[in-house]
Image: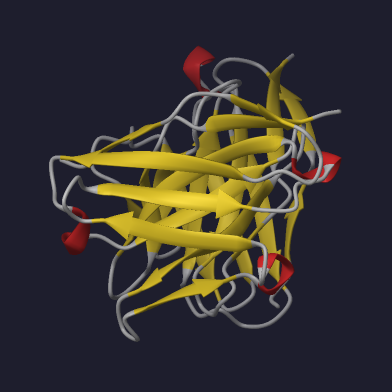
Amino acid sequence: QVQLVQSGAEVKKPGASVKVSCKVSGYTLTELSMHWVRQAPGKGLEWMGGFDPEDGETIYAQKFQGRVTMTEDTSTDTAYMELSSLRSEDTAVYYCATYRGAIYGRFDPWGQGTLVTVSS
Amino acid sequence: DIQMTQSPSSLSASVGDRVTITCRASQSIRSDLNWYQQKPGKAPKLLIYGASILLSGVPSRFSGSGSGTDFTLTISSLQPEDFATYYCQQSYSSPCTFGQGTKVEIK
């Protein structure tokens, strides 16, 4: 079964960038559709983007267009999410999650989450 | 974007109670509706997909129903390990969107 292990917590200053990793085991990354979801402290879940296997492209939520880049290293089965021009509102737990199901798409499983704190 | 509205935002219940959480979509999403459970400090876990299909290994006290715009998650007999926050999510169209969550607390 798929297991996702994310990199550790990060503290960044406003304006900086952060790159979070998500290591896959149990499957190869090429077999999966990896997505990223974030959760601000005490708030709900917000989809950021992910790989669309139908188009073969990565799609991003409009809110993050131009600031987020999602990449994959298939040699190490590791997915990355880089968010730039960080501001305090980007303080959140960032999750990678596998999107599965040609019918009834769903996120399963999820990584353990990576806390990114943006503070001066 | 499709808006997902859950109700209530929170509820207090006792062990053994029957609990129902509703989720309403701003337009029809057929049965493309998933339910997740999240405990404090943990990642969400998928419980139900396709509105009513129970993920393997999820206790049968959990059930989902609905189609179109109105959906429910029911816990038939609340157990201590069920105290958590529950989220609905639509996968009908991009961007996928989540409800704001329903926190189930101990009475």
Is there any visible trace of residue B15 in the rendered image?
A: yes
Which is more toward the observer, B89 or A112? A112
Q: Toward which corner of the image does residue A90 lie, by quadrant?
A: top right
The residue shown at (41%, 40%) is A21
Residue A7: where, in percent of width, then height? 43, 30
Q: Is residue A116 left or right of residue A80?
A: right
The residue shown at (82%, 45%) is A87
The residue shown at (78%, 34%) is A13
Residue A84: where, in percent of width, then height? 67, 53
Image: A112 above or below A79: above
Q: Quadrant of the N terminus of chain A?
A: top left
Residue B51: where, in percent of width, then height? 45, 62
Is there any visible trace of residue B75 in the rendered image?
A: no
Residue B35: where, in percent of width, then height? 50, 50
The residue shown at (57%, 68%) is B96
Q: Is residue B45 left or right of residue A2?
A: right
Image: B73 above or below B4: above
Q: Quadrant of the C terminus of chain A?
A: top right
Q: Is residue A30 left or right of residue A101?
A: left
Q: Is residue B35 left or right of residue B95?
A: left
